[in-house]
Image (spheres, helix red, strand yellow):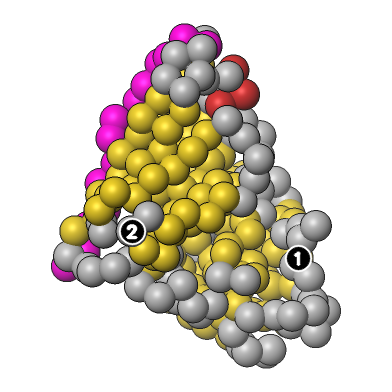
């Protein structure tokens, strides 16, 4: 069966510090991968998605970036965190990205930028 | 800008009450509407994927309907239980991406 892991679970970082969040998927090959964020008082917002190694699409302008160095690994990064980067970050995967296909979410990382 | 609206934002009911909430989405270029349940400290869990106008899906005490022509979906919970307490999210699929509403936070008191 497929599983999705995220770490760390919780992170407190000072403004201006770098960030690296990792997501890995097991039990499937060539998944579509997604990074979402839920900021305080807002809905889940898609940040990045990837259909393959090295292929990243960015949905919103921001100071975050994403990379997919391996088939089942998706990394969210920042060189300098802002207060507004605080939120709950969820990684998700799907098989093909078709409209009727479910996306499966990881446990998430709660990030607090102080 | 595509917008998905959910109402109410939060709902407090007693155990045994039946409840329903609404998801509104753009009625043009419809592909699919997804419902998720998100319990505290857990991952969002898929409930339903709905694709056809008039679709009705059921999972235990939870059911959902879809009207793609007017752009809304209802989620019903019959005889709410404390374990139903969660945030219920709907998401509109467009261009291979899910656009989420803000969710309805349901609290069921024993």
Image position of A15 (left or right of A1): right
Q: Is residue B104 visible?
A: no
Where disc 2 sits, the SS reads loop
| Classed neighbour count for the residue bearing mark 2: other residues with Cα under 10 Å, few (<14), some (14–19), many (≥20) | some
Q: Which residues, given as a range, are shown in magenta?
A: A1-15
* Residue A54 position by quadrant: bottom left
Q: Between A21 and A56, which is closer to the camera in this rendering?
A: A56
| Classed neighbour count for the residue bearing mark 1: other residues with Cα under 10 Å, few (<14), some (14–19), many (≥20) | many
Q: Between A44 and B82, which is closer to the camera in this rendering?
A: A44
Residue B60 image position (x, y, % from top left): 41, 74
Where disc 1 sits, the SS reads strand
Residue hosting label 1: B24
Q: Is residue A9 magenta?
A: yes
Residue drawn at (44%, 43%), measured in percent from left and top? A66
Q: Is residue A53 visible?
A: yes
Residue hosting label 2: A53
Q: Chain of mark 1?
A: B
Q: Is residue A111 magenta?
A: no
Residue drawn at (79%, 77%), measured in percent from left and top? B27
Question: Does B35 appear above or below A34?
Answer: below
Image position of B6 (left or right of B106): right
Residue B88 image position (x, y, % from top left): 55, 55
Q: Residue furthest front?
A: A54
Say if labels 2 and 1 share a chain.
no
What secondary structure is the magenta-colored segment mainly? strand
In whole angstroms, how far apart are the C-alphas of marks 2 and 1?
35 Å
Question: Does A73 appear above or below A80?
Answer: below
Q: Chain of mark 2?
A: A
Residue drawn at (26%, 59%), measured in percent from left and top? A71
Residue A92 image position (x, y, % from top left): 40, 55
Of marks 2 and 1, the one in the foreground: 2
């Amino acid at each position: 069966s497929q599983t999705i892991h995220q770490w760390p679970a919780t992170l407190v970082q000072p403004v201006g510090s770098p960030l690296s969040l990792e997501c890995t998927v097991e039990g499937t090959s060539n998944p579509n991968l997604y990074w979402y964020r839920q900021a305080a008082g807002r809905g889940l917002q898609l940040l990045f998605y990837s259909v393959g190694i090295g292929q990243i699409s960015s949905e919103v302008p921001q100071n975050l970036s994403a990379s997919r160095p391996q088939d089942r690994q998706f990394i969210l990064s920042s060189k300098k965190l802002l207060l507004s980067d605080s939120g709950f970050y969820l990684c998700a995967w799907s098989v093909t990205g078709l409209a009727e296909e479910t996306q499966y979410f990881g446990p998430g990382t709660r990030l607090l930028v102080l | 800008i595509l917008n998905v609206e959910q109402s109410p934002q939060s709902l407090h009911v007693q155990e045994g009450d039946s409840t329903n909430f609404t998801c509104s989405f753009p009625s043009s270029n419809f592909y699919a509407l997804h419902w998720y349940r998100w319990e505290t400290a857990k991952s969002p869990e898929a409930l339903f994927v709905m694709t056809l106008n008039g679709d009705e899906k059921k999972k235990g005490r939870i059911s959902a309907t879809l009207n793609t022509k007017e752009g809304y979906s209802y989620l019903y919970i019959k005889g709410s239980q404390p374990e139903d307490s969660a945030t219920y999210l709907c998401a509109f699929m467009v261009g291979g991406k899910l656009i989420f509403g803000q969710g309805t936070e349901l609290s069921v008191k024993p």
